[in-house]
Image: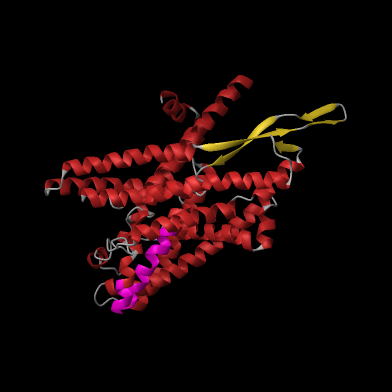
Amino acid sequence: MFNFVSGLVNIADLRKKFLFTVGMIILFRAGVHIPVPGIDTVKLQSLFGGGNILGFLDLFTGGAFMRFSIFAMGIVPYINASIIMQLMQVVVPQLEELAKEGDAGRKQIASYTRYLTVVLAAFQAFGMSFWLRGVMIDGYSFVIFLLGTVVSLTAGSTLVMWFGELITERGIGNGASVLIFVGIVARIPTYIGQTITLVRGGASLFGVLILLASFLVMIVAIILVQEAQRRIPVQYAKRIIGRKMYGGQSTYIPMRINQGGVIPIIFASSVLLFPATVAQFIPNPAVQKLVQLISPSGSLYMVFYFALIFFFTYFYTAITFNPNDLAENIKKYGGFVLGIRPGKPTAQYLEYVITRLTLVGALFLSLVAVIPTIVESLTHVTSFQGLGSTALLIMVGVALDLVRQIQTHLVTRQYEGIIA
């Protein structure tokens, strides 16, 4: 730990990256408190906590959406654009070829992602203007509110996207993940204050301790599963080219248990919360009753939530891991999995292994997603309702990534000293 902190202070390059990241975070948190004009904040507060998508989106903005600031949409449009572009690479052959062209292709896809982010942000801001027209300040012009909201939120999302890219390029960690991490951490003091208020109001202190203990157990489990991997041994044959011998080395393919990370939970949450949000515009009692069953407070919510996470874990793994391409690349460079013939048998073996690993990962994600809801219903402590499985997975994943990057800098520094 001492070496960790000492590296941040003494290594100039690492210190600059760290201070740059902190500066971007300060700018991001400052923008969270700049409101979009025309909104009655008291009316807006009443919309949250009712089991709709607003509370879920506010998780990724660190309270900016609840305040309806210029960063109300945060990094969400950029995340959506990134996911869409990732899916499009599987569907559109031209994008798939572009992704295989190296740095030039990735830069072009990154440009497309930025343009799509602006389009999604503008579209989402336009929809929010109509959605939230009922919480405008009395007498405020809707046309002015519409124009101001679309311009402010689109510009805010573009600025947050830029902050994220700057952190990725010049700071420490993945910029988008860091901003989400900061937003979640910023809400923790609020959760603690709400818990203290509940205890003072007569809530069981024992129930609070059980809830906190369950969070601790889940954090440990998430770390273990996130770091766990199946290593497939690969041997490369020796080749003699001229007077030199190449290859002959042993390595392995690291196959993680949780290939999808937090993406399956995000997809499942969005799919389940969307009907509850749309139902607000349909006053039909039958529709309201049907949607209530799958809302976060409904009796079928956890069943559907568990099933959707399970499905999306397999779905996301299938589109991001291609055993045929991996087997072909191994064969191309003269390698083979020990005990398995190169080519199609290797692809079949890799698919068999990833299917079994994904089963474990899907069960883990599904259980982690529903455990907080079960514990909250048993303890009747709802002050940490926003700090659910999605938040814990993001926090642990980003923290582990930051530690890895800092340790990499420290190790690189040690080798540079040896070489010098």
Residue 37 place in picture, x, y as percent: 32, 67
Apparent side of residue 355 relative to residue 71 in the rendered image (left or right): right
Q: Residue at x 48, y 57 (%)?
A: 311
Residue nearest the viewer, comparing 283 with 299: 299
Q: Residue at x 59, y 43 (%)?
A: 353
Quadrant holding the N terminus:
top left
How many numbered circles are shown? 0
Residue 358 place in picture, x, y as percent: 52, 47
Give the magenta range. Answer: 268-289
Relative vertical location of residue 278 with respect to residue 388 in this rendering, above or below: below
Residue nearest the viewer, comparing 86 with 300: 300
Apparent side of residue 296 relative to residue 6 in the rendered image (left or right): left
Relative vertical location of residue 312 with respect to residue 129 in this rendering, above or below: above
Residue nearest the viewer, comparing 332 with 309: 309
Residue 308 place in picture, x, y as percent: 44, 58
Q: Residue furthest bottom?
A: 284
Residue nearest the viewer, comparing 344 with 199: 344
Quadrant holding the C terminus:
top right
Relative vertical location of residue 376 with respect to residue 116 in this rendering, above or below: above
Q: Quick check: is 277 in the magenta stretch?
A: yes
Apparent side of residue 215 relative to residue 360 in the rendered image (left or right): left
Q: Residue at x 34, y 73 (%)?
A: 279
* Secondary structure mostly seen in the magenta stretch: helix
Q: Residue at x 50, y 37 (%)?
A: 228
